[in-house]
Image: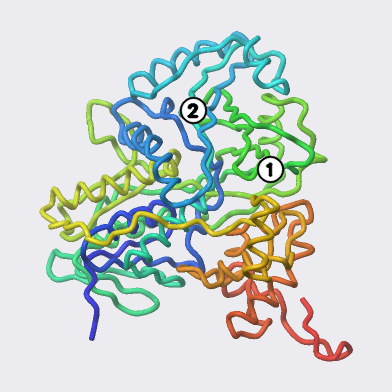
Amino acid sequence: MTIVYDFIVIGGGVVGSMIARWLSRYEGEVLLIEKDADIGMGSTCANSAIVHAGYDPLPGSLKAQMNVRGSAMFDELSAELGFGFDRRGDYVVAIGDEELPMLDTLLAQGKRNAVPDMRLISGEEMRRREPGINPKVSGALWAASGGVCDPFQMCVAAAENAVINGAKVMLNTAFEDFLWDGRRIIGVRTNQGEFRSRWVINAAGIYADVVMHKAGVRPDFFITARKGEYFVFDRAEIKLFNVLFPVPTAKGKGVLVTSTTHENTIVGPNANVVPDKEDTSSTKEGSEEIWSGAQKLVPSLSLRSVIASFVGLRPTGNGPSRDPMLGYHNDFVIEIPKEAQGFVNLGGIESPGLTSAPAIAEEVVRLLADAGEPLKVKKKWNPIRPARPRFAHLSHEERKALTEKDPSYGRIVCRCENVMEGEILAEIHAPIPARTYDAIKRRTWLGTGRCQGGFDMTRVVDILARETGVSPLEVTKRGKGSEYLYRTTKARGGEYVA
């Protein structure tokens, strides 16, 4: 018997996962499809991890509305879903007197956007709050509602909560086209077969333009990939608690220096247009650009403390604002278009997309209700996704009790981040199972310390092979085509080699 879903969500990034979670609150069948081997492998897992206060988007834009509303939702959301979040505030830092006027502009803009608790502080006060700041600092805008979160944990927690409440998630399932009945979309065709539904929601991120064009919607809308490069610092070498932005430019918010929920400091990103939507390569020029920007804010940073780099792509669209008086482009697209019935269309969800994700999910539900969708709350809907134990964060007493209950929590796998075998097993057998090294890495943070997986990789391969019943030759880093091992050795009695 073919299942006819009520809602199919295309794209398992943080926006799609939040939408699936919001829809799982209501009676009906929800399917989330994701083309990659794990959820959150696009922009969600490679960004600045900032919860933006909301002073940057143009007043009256959807970005401003979704940003401020989304930010206000994080305290309750992180408590329900158990992901890392710290509303520690953020600073926009002016270096030299010529940058000071921009702080007044951002303050006024933030007030128009209804951003709470903002104020200007002097250069002297900024130096007191962040001793490592450039001594030429002339002032700063302080926004107490800014913060940092763990973007991937936020994504996986939302998707898992959707699964807990009856939704289905299909990985390695790439959208190919729509199924039609006249002008109504009645499902999708994928590389895993056809799936029928009453509504399809486009949350395809950097490929959202491709999806909407298949629906005959917004033929003039295109998404441009903007590459952002980052450095990650060893937290044992550099301690920074603050979130530091430069004054913004026409290219974006600029290269920031920020702490994270994992206590590392990161710097980046730049914003360079690339034609390839899969181009996540680091470049010499990009590295020099972000390093120059970082040193403008914190001159004492040292490249000797960098332990990793990564690259993310932002889906910059050319969507006009809902308010034509703004004359504003690159706004979010969130709509039920007239051209295709049964279709909810999202596009251009770049920064502050992470912050806006819960508000976007809420807006999708509102649009569906306005379209006449009978949304009936499930009697047993559960908003809680319990966080799993993180050994490194436990007290000695808690560690002892956990290890006595489950001895696998007494076997260390990652020394740098203090990750135990029990944590890996829990992720492999979670509501959305981790089936690759990177999936486990994003969930547990193993392999992110100074050795960058040099100690734990072989152990993780063994555990994945054992627990999933596959050969170690089939274990991958991030999905098919990224296998670690390719044959057994003859000289070493059948052992596996990379």
Give the side of residue 428 with respect to residue 496, left or right.
Answer: left
Toward the viewer: 375 or 318? 375
Q: Residue 250 carries which label?
A: 2
Colour convention:
rainbow
Q: Residue at x 17, y 58 (%)?
A: 376
Q: Residues within 10 Å of mark 2 (few under 14, many from 20)?
A: few
Toward the viewer: 434 or 43? 434
Q: Which residue is drawn at 52% across and 18% down?
A: 141
Residue 488 vertical position relative to residue 67 in the rendered view, above or below: below
- Percent of width and height locating residue 219: 28, 52
Q: Distance between the Cα atoms at labels 1 and 2?
A: 23 Å
- Percent of width and height locating residue 94: 59, 16
Q: Which of the two discs, 1 and 2, labels the residue nearer the N terminus? A: 1
Q: Which amino acid does label 2 sit on?
A: Ala
Q: Which amino acid does label 1 sit on?
A: Phe
Q: Mark 1 points at which residue?
A: 231
- Percent of width and height locating residue 220: 30, 47
> In terms of image quadrants, where is residue 272?
top right
Give the side of residue 76 with respect to residue 481, left or right.
Answer: left
The quadrant of the picture occupied by the C terminus is bottom right
- Percent of width and height locating residue 454: 78, 62
Toward the viewer: 292 or 261? 261
Q: Residue at x 33, y 54 (%)?
A: 19
